[in-house]
Image: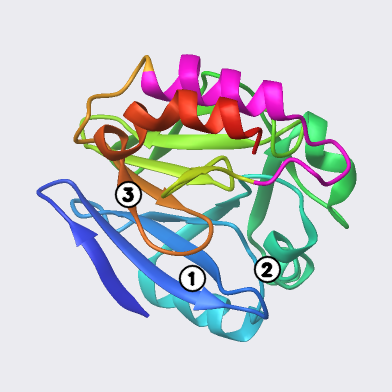
Amino acid sequence: MTLHYEDSLVEVHRVVVGPVDNNVHVIRCKETGEAVLVDAANEHELLLDLCRQLGVRRVVETHGHWDHIQAVEAVRDAGFDVAVTAADAGMLPSYDQILDDDAVLEVGRLRIRTIATPGHTAGSMCFHVEGTKLLFSGDTLFPGGPGATTFPGGDFGSIIGSIESRIFARFNPDTLVLPGHGVDTNVGSEQPHLQEWVDRGW
C-alpha cells in the first residue's frame, strides 16, 4: 500500500494486485477518515486489510471484467457493499447496489460524481472527486489511448465517444487520470491524440 496522492481534501492510496497488475485505489476523506475502494480486483486478504486500516465503507466497480472483480465475493462476505452499473451487474458473482450515471457518492465530506463511459464494456464508469483534479478512469482511458474494445460488449465507437464527450469535453487539461492498470496521465497529455486513436482504430 502506498499513499499515491493527497491534497487538502483527499488521500488516494494505491495497491497493485493480481496477474495483470490491476490498480486498486482507496479514496479517503481527510476530514472524516471515511473511504471507498475502487475495484475489488484480486488478493482479497490484502484488500480487506486496506479496508480496515483506511476506513472503507463501500466498494465501487469501474466495470465487470474478471480481473477487476476477483475479490468481490470476499469483500461482500466481510460486510462491504459492492456497487456496479446495471449494464455490467450480470458480470459479477454478486453485488448490492446499482450505480447510476451522474449520481453523487458521499464519502465523508467528499462528493464523488459517477460518469457512465460505455465502450470498454457496456457499463463502464469513471469517478470524479468533486473539488479535486482526480478522475478514476477504470479501463476507459490510459496513457496513449482508450482501453481495449475487442472483448464481448466492447465497442470502439462508443469508447471514443465516451472519452471525447464525457472526459475531454468536461475536464481541464490538468485533470489527473488514474487508470485501472499502469501509470497515471492527465487530460492535457491525451486530448491532442484523439484523432490519432480514431485513425488507427484502437
SS state under label 2: helix
Asked if disc 1 and disc 2 are in contact, CB closer than 8 Å, the reply is: yes
Could you tell me residue 8's position as x and y percent? 9, 48
Drawn side of residue 119 relative to residue 160, left or right = right
* Furthest residue toward left: 8
Q: Residue at x 64, y 79 (%)?
A: 18
Label 2 sits on residue? 75
Q: Residues within 10 Å of mark 2 (few under 14, many from 20)?
A: many
Range of magenta residues: 148-168
Could you tell me residue 123's position as x and y percent? 73, 32
* Nearer the observer, 123 or 105: 123
Q: Residue at x 52, y 22 (%)?
A: 103
Q: Residue at x 74, y 73 (%)?
A: 74
Amino acid carrying label 1: it is Cys
Asked if disc 2 and disc 3 are in contact, CB closer than 8 Å, the reply is: no
| C-alpha distance separating marks 1 and 2 | 9 Å
Label 1 sits on residue? 51
User: Mark 3 vs mark 1: which is more N-terminal?
Assistant: 1
**In the image, residue 168 above or below residue 119:** above
**In the image, residue 107 above or below residue 58:** above
Label 3 sits on residue? 185
